[in-house]
Image (cartoon, rainbow, N blue to C red):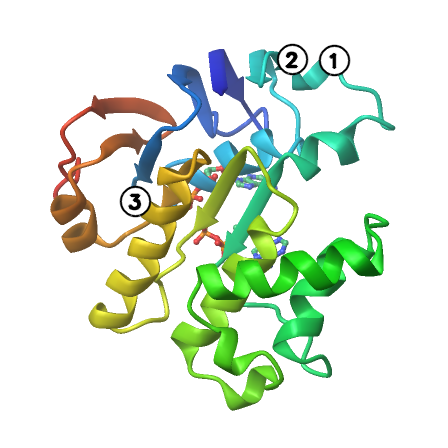
Amino acid sequence: MIEFKNVTKGYDKNKSDALKNVSLFIDKGEFVFLVGRSGAGKSTFIKLLLREIEATEGSVYINNFNVSKLSKKEIPFLRRKMGIVFQDFRLLENKSVYENVAYAMEIIGKSEKQIQKRVPLALDMVGLSHRMNHYPHELSGGEQQRVVIARAIINNPSILICDEPTGNLDPETSYEIISILEEINRRGTTVVVVTHDREIVDTMKKRVLTLEDGVLKVDDATGRYGYEV
Ligand code: ADP
Ligand code: ADP
């Protein structure tokens, strides 16, 4: 679960705050879209969740932990609870699909046996078993994004954060990616998707949070894209 209690974040004293007194609660297992114009505060929201930055005022809770109370040593453990999917894929070009996903397990010290068991399951989940030994440049954009998703879920995060996951993809591929995220959510992971894709938001009928100039303007349970372009 994610909770913001009266969170304000200012970067610059001479400028308006990037987030202004934002309070919200996202329960375990929810699927939420976060929308808003460029500069509305979406990246700031994500960086607060990852504790890349700290709130100026208020508190951020993840799975009941106040993230600003975590010590330096505890932060990596917080981040392991979260899977992250960015728009720009950032796969390792010299590693195969299998190796890209396996690498996320290696760096946290999982055994070869665990890796060999889990990686094929994750690739199956995103429909990429047949591309296991291919390299990123041999894949389409949608396939690369599937690898990124497999990598993000390989260590069983409780929360999956996706920043414009369909930003570079055509509409049909975008829907395929969103249905994979929906399936991951169905299996129990909380999913937060930052997006500009009005059509997807309106079609999916999920909860939509709308930020406007740092203010949480709309929290709509029935899924409507919350501002006019
Ligand atoms: P979004 O992701 O919705 O585009 P951001 O969270 O990136 O919005 O930005 C919100 C506001 O905070 C903007 O006015 C932006 O210019 C400002 N901002 C973001 N990051 C910084 C930073 N590192 N230093 C100063 N201002 C920043
Ligand atoms: P916006 O959401 O405002 O359009 P981006 O999604 O491009 O902006 O980036 C949001 C923030 O996340 C930026 O500060 C960027 O440096 C960071 N970022 C983007 N992609 C990655 C990544 N793959 N790994 C780590 N940080 C990233």
Identified by mark 3, the residue type is Arg
Give the Cα distance between marks 3 and 2: 28 Å
Label at residue 117:
none
Give the Cα distance between marks 1 and 2: 6 Å
Which residue is rendered at x = 48% and y = 25% of the image? Answer: 17
Q: Earlier in the sequence, mark 3 or mark 2?
A: 3
* Residue 100, quarter of picture: bottom right
Please state the horizontal and vertical placement of residue 22, each as a whole percent of the image: 41, 17
Please state the horizontal and vertical placement of residue 24, each as a whole percent of the image: 39, 16
Q: Is 153 above or below relative to 31?
A: below
Label at residue 69:
1
What residue sits right under mark 3 in the picture? Answer: 37
Q: Earlier in the sequence, mark 1 or mark 3?
A: 3
Q: Nearer the viewer, residue 22 or 16?
A: 22
What residue sits right under mark 2 in the picture? Answer: 66
Give the Cα distance between marks 1 and 3: 31 Å
The residue sitting at the bottom extreme is 138
Do residues under tags 1 and 2 come within 8 Å of each other at their CB atoms?
A: yes
